[in-house]
Image (tube, grey):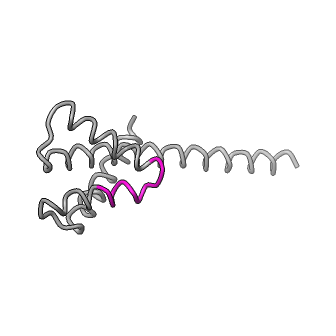
Amino acid sequence: MDSLNDRRDAFENKFAHDETLRFRAIARRNRLLGAWAAYHLGHEGEVAEAYAESIVQAGVVDPVRAVSRVSDDLSARGIEGRVVLAKAEELLAAASEEVRNG
């Protein structure tokens, strides 16, 4: 019976670890996406940093909201939503790699 409990605990620990890494990767992606969007919006310095942070915060509430907000903000600059989605996917892959490698 102990081996079943040990196995269950190991699966639960792995799940918790994987979810933590996923959350960190998405937060990192949102920061990178926010910085990318800030550049295209013409923001620099503290304004760009504040914008990127606001995208991270939006993503904490709802991960989809961060990408949606960037898409909405950039549509006024003529950047289509599909471009934003492609960039978000690209940045998520990079952020996941960064998080995995520490």
Q: Indicate the position of residue 102 as horizontal and vertical percent values.
A: 40, 34
Magenta segment: 60-69
Residue 67: within the magenta? yes
Residue that appears at 15% across and 63% down: 79
- Is 25 positioned to the left or the right of 78 in the image? right
Number of numbered discs: 0
The residue that appears at 23% across and 43% down in the rendered structure is 35
Magenta residue check for 39: no
**Which SS type dominates the magenta stretch?**
helix
Q: Residue at x 26, y 61 (%)?
A: 72
* Residue closest to the eye, 15 or 45: 45
At x 67%, y 50%, the residue is 11
The residue nearer to you, when weighing 58 against 7, is 58
Residue 15 locus on image (x, y percent): 61, 50
Location of residue 77 (image quadrant): bottom left
- Residue 57 horizontal side relative to residue 16, left or right: left
Whole-percent x and y of residue 70?
27, 55
Q: Position of residue 82 (x, y in %)?
A: 23, 69
Outermost residue, top direction?
46
Q: Is residue 92 above or below residue 98?
A: below
